[in-house]
Image (cartoon, rainbow, N blue to C red):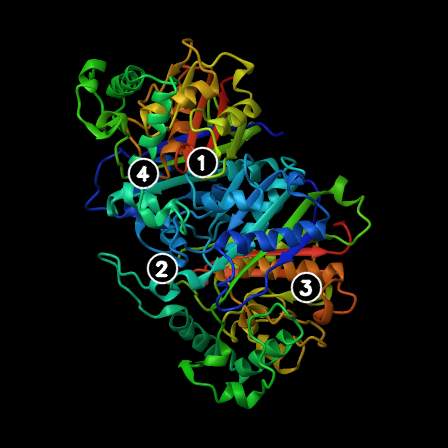
Amino acid sequence: MAEMTAVVGIGQTNYQAKRLDVSQAGLLRDAAEKALADAGCTWADIDAVIIGKAPDLFEGVMMPELFLNDAIGGAYKPMLRVHTAGSVGGSTGIVAASMVQSGIHDRVLCVAYEKQSESNATWALSIAMPFSLATVAGAGGYFAPLVRGYIRRSGAPEDTGIRVAVKDRQNALRNPLAHLHLEDISFEMVANSPMLWDPIRYLETCPSSDGACAMVMEKESLASQRSGKVAWVHATEMRSEPTMFSGRDQVMPQATLDNAAALYKKAGITKPREELDCAEIYVPFSWFEPMWMEGMLITEPGEGWKMTYEGATALDGDFPVNMSGGVLSSNPIGASGLIRFAEAARQVRGLAEDHQVDGAKKALGHAYGGGSQYFSTWIVGSEKPA
Amino acid sequence: MRDVAVVGFTQSPSVRREPNRNEVEILIPVIDALREQTGLVSQDFDFVCSGSSDYLAGQSFAFVSGLDAVGAWPPVCESHVEMDGAWALYEAWVKIQMGYADTALVYGFGKPSMGDLPLTMALQLDPYSVMPLWPDAISIAGLQARLCLEGGIITEREMAGAAVRDRGHAKGNPNAQIAGDYTVDGILAEPFLVNPLRKSDCAPISDGASAIVLAAGDRARSLSERPAWIRGIEHICEPQDLGVRDLGRSRSTEIAGEKAGVSAGQVDIAELSAPFTHQEILVEKALGLTEATQVNPSGGALAGNPMMAVGLSRIGECAARIWQGDADRAVAHATSGPCLQQNLVCVLEGE
């Protein structure tokens, strides 16, 4: 029943710690203008605008989409603001796609961003609420025990995370937009970086970035007429579960397993490792690469670390992961999910420049958030879905 | 387009302060009541969508714990907008249109009593040039009201009349926060709160939550004897800057109302969520409502104003009157942002 939908334009800012040269509005407009240029569209061609970002306290503006809408051509158009924790960038892409898939709009613009330099994320995440236990752990402190749990279950070698970090940071050297370009990255450099939240070392964590990512999506009858390459949306899926309850498996949440199964079913995929050519996965801490290889049913339980170890997830491996350098190399939180979705689309359009996977035809974009409880994913392809 | 109807609606009472319950504790009985009303359980909802604001809770990711009220196990297909629940309903309606879902649970909740709401709302304004001046929400609305009065668009008596009407209607609404027999002269005798606004021109500050069930086609018919079908739902956002738009009319409401087909038939009732009397009149004008329409039979936002739920509740109030046969065609309105910046219009009909 859903209309076929394609990504026809992608725009990204460069990612860096502080974009002091632009306001929030300027940051979004930069990404949006690039997406429009890529799509060969003008502001007038856009029917609706979808804006995504993580918590408002990250910039200190309540519902900032209200003041930003005008800067990205949203005046007197429908505008929605998505917020689903760390997965929000992915959810923003999914909501935008659904506006076209439902037949309601012909062409929409979505923009996800974070300008973390305008506030303080650690403050924003550390507000003590009455009668609530404050974990005061930050994201790394929250996820470290989950990584420990994964290592214990899988028997993964302790240096798996280091290998992920080296690989993603090497990939980032091929991506001029990436926040971190560590020219002399090596196993020893990561291994010798300070231990922040055992077993997560400093160089196994993501940076704090400013940046925005934008996409233009279009209905089939318009996208089919284009001479340039587009990325067809084959399937989108999302799942959520509560943060805490007795018996919840936080290491391998049911929501990720359900999400993956539903996504592949919709996309007509039975053997994801063989049928997908590459994946951009939300890996804010290195160990989440092997964890989500299992969580996305790409390999068997307990086997995810082997993919890293065997080099399968390297750019020249049989299942490249995080070709752009991933969240480990750029992390404007609210945009990070949409950047993953955008990288998957760039790959199947064959426009990923120096981090292109040769001949990529189907790619997975993935985001997660909260306490490993929100998942949004999509599969895009160079050909229309069957 | 698929036929989609509102088949369930519950809400908490609007109260000035919920000192003993957090947002989720306010929400839990609302969703429990909705399950009872519809006979549905969490697994019956193909899609769940909510609206709330972190800045009201004073906490990042405040909406995450809303999943505890849903009982999101097994895991649910779920999304969230940092907007009034009316826009969450729009997203759910879109998901049903694309065939992703046949039923959806939508909820909105807010607890503005955690802070100083008029000042908190200043944080919605341009953070570089306007917000540092800390213009509170009532003062911003006061500028608009002054413009409307000076421009001969609205009179003070009309403003007071809106409050009298709404709070009179609210006497029949057990969930209302402000209800009673007010008079125009009595209100005009009130001192100014922020000139030209008097206290009675302002919606109350309310803690509260509401929830709705949407269903498509035959599913809706099986859940309701008289579903309230959504015949049109549109929303439009204006630029925020007060200097670049006409504050003497609500252009975005006009556009949304036209696209939603408000004028295609008689409007029996309208539920408006404008938080100030002059804004309610601007919305009435923008929708082209006439004497034939009963405005705010529940009392509207001026009788109870739970931020992030108040717009969703307007849709629910319309639907409930259609279920009961009190109305055949109704228009619900939701707003967001300073001076009616963003507006949603939903047209509902019985069969």
Alpha carbon of mark 4 to alpha carbon of mark 3: how far? 52 Å
Query: What type is the residue that disc 4 sits on?
Result: Ala
Alpha carbon of mark 3 to alpha carbon of mark 1: how far? 54 Å
| Front residue of A72 and B269 | A72
Q: Is residue A233 visible?
A: no
Q: Are marks 2 and 4 in contact (CB under 8 Å)?
A: no
Are discs 2 and 4 both within one chain? no
- Residue picked out by circle 4: B137
Are discs 1 and 4 both within one chain? yes
Alpha carbon of mark 2 to alpha carbon of mark 3: how far? 31 Å
Which mark is on residue B243?
1
Alpha carbon of mark 1 to alpha carbon of mark 4: how far? 16 Å
Secondary structure of the residue carrying tag 3 is helix
Q: Residue at x 33, y 25 (%)?
A: B300
Which sits earlier in the primary sequence, circle 1 or circle 4? 4
- Residue picked out by circle 3: A272
Q: Chain of mark 3?
A: A
Q: Are marks 2 and 1 in contact (CB under 8 Å)?
A: no
